[in-house]
Amino acid sequence: MNELAIKDLLYKLADDQLILGHRNSEWTGFGPILEEDIAFSSMAQDKIGHSLAFYTLLHELGEADPDTVAFTRNANRFHNSQLVELPNGEYDFSLIRHFLYDNAEIIRFEMLSASRYEPIAKVATKLKGEVKYHVLHANTWIKNLGSSTEEAILRLQAALNEAMPYALGMFEPSAYEQELISEGVYGGEEAVKAEWLQRITAVLEKTALQLPDLDSITPKVGGRKGTHTEHLQPLLDEMAEVFKIDPTAEW
């Protein structure tokens, strides 16, 4: 198997998890209710743990150790989708992003559990149970709030409309896409997107929310190749502040 293709896939997975994990952690102490404060904090911890697992696989393939990879790269070397780096905004936007992202992520983990690349299959199999709970949390709140008050519905719809171009950018294909598919490493982004649309549509149909017209949307791509919004670098600087004080420190 092409090692460069494997590394590209791992960086995409790890960087998404790391950045969204840090965004979710920003709800700690600020959740709209205590239950959601705890929920987003717990999911943040899970996602950062998932990123560590994938960075560890990269380290085994000759990349730098996880802390160095996570805390010393600039934005143009990150492979995360632009969706995960956007500021949290109000709870409606964070909830919609959580719904759109985690419904895609569980499909990736399900596919990767059957990967012919054994190291990634083992990690995905181990971690997908946690992602299932993230999906359950997101879908439950979307169904509840998306069928509740007029204000809740209007705010969620606006957030869905705003987030969708960035969500479609999650499925930006890799330069190694066909190789990964043909070698049985990964099912590919088009397959993930098709299943994702079915799953999110099934949830939205149980609410008053409407899926935006996808034909009229230009996906926000570039994140997988190092092109990011102005929001990523300040987040990376904040994340790395303590590490850069003394990179040799042991905790």
Image: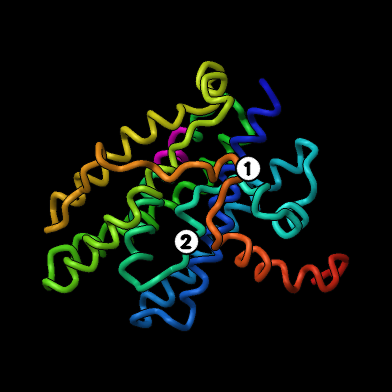
**On the rendered image, what quadrant is the C terminus found in?**
bottom right
- Dot 1 corresponds to which residue? 11
**On the rendered image, what quadrant is the N terminus found in?**
top right
Q: Residue at x 16, y 52 (%)?
A: 210
Three-letter amino acid code of the residue under disc 1: Tyr
Q: Answer with the quarter of the image where residue 158 lies.
A: bottom left
The rendered magenta stretch, by its main secondary structure, is classed as helix
Q: Position of residue 90 (x, y in %)?
A: 36, 73
Q: Residue at x 68, y 47 (%)?
A: 77
Q: Nearer the viewer, mark 1 or mark 2?
A: 2
Task: Give whichever of 135, 22 is nearer the camera.
Answer: 22
**Circle 1 Cα neighbour tier, 10 Å, few/some/many (<14 / 14–19 / ≥20):** many
Rendered image: mark on residue 126? none
Q: Position of residue 135 (x, y in %)?
A: 35, 54
Task: Give whichever of 28, 208 is nearer the camera.
Answer: 208
Q: Residue at x 84, y 69 (%)?
A: 250
- Dot 2 corresponds to which residue? 86
Mark with earlier residue (1, 2)? 1
Residue 235 in the magenta stretch? The answer is: no
Q: Position of residue 95 (x, y in %)?
A: 34, 64
Three-letter amino acid code of the residue under disc 2: Leu
Residue 109 in the magenta stretch? The answer is: yes
Q: Position of residue 7 (x, y in %)?
A: 67, 35
Q: Answer with the quarter of the image where residue 92 lies.
A: bottom left
**Circle 2 Cα neighbour tier, 10 Å, few/some/many (<14 / 14–19 / ≥20):** many
Q: Is residue 115 left or right of residue 193?
A: right
Q: Tag 2's secondary structure?
A: loop
Please state the extent of the stretch shown in magenta in the rendering.
Answer: 107-111
